Amino acid sequence: METTGTFTFESAAEARERYESVGPAAQTVVREVAKAMAFDREEYDERVDGDVVETARDALFASLLEVRVGSREEYEEWRERYDGQVTEVGHERVDSVAWHAGPTGEAVAATFQDEEEAAVATLRRQAFGRLYREVIED
């Protein structure tokens, strides 16, 4: 089993705090991407609004979530010890699983056969939408 990413949280408050902390980085990323795309000041002001920066913050936060990746057996062992609800997407007969447990007693898992990177990216989007969106808006 391997772990990728850095964000894991013991509480919803800790998740909200970390989400807020990536705001300045998201703003910088958006500004630098706009600069690389040769936006002048007028185009920047016209096209880059709060929703664009918020989307960047959401993506940055999700991309940093800690994800465990392992065999079906390793996942099942973890699941037996986990005292919460797990939403699993994918097919139960594949060999590998990626999973993330959120701070509120819920977890998400995505099964995959060969495309680990794609599964991890999908799982992070699922985790953000299912486990964190409401938590960060509270």
Image (spheres, rainbow, N blue to C red):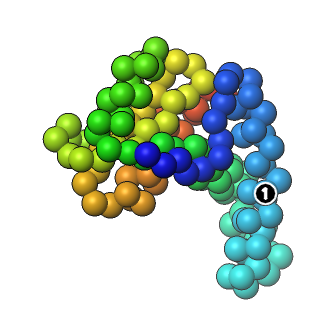
Residue at 36% in and 35% down: 75
Say if 121 sits above or below 126 in the image. below
Residue 49 in the image, given as x and y percentages of width and height? 73, 57
Q: Which residue position holds label 1?
A: 25
Up/down of 124 relative to 134, above or below: below
Camera sees residue 123: no
Which of 108 and 37 lies nearest the eye of the viewer? Answer: 108
Callout 1 secondary element:
helix
Please tell me how crowded label 1 is: few (under 14), some (14-19), or many (20+) other residues with Cα within 10 Å.
some
Where's residue 130, x and y in %?
Answer: 47, 32
Relative placement, left or right, of 73 versus 83 is left
Of 122 and 100, which appears nearest the observer? 100
Residue visible at 45% across and 20% down in the picture = 82
Q: Nearer the viewer, residue 38 or 63?
A: 63
Q: Residue at x 43, y 38 (%)?
A: 99
Nearer to the camera, 82 or 121: 82
Q: Residue at x 71, y 82 (%)?
A: 36
What's the amino acid at mark 1?
A: Ala
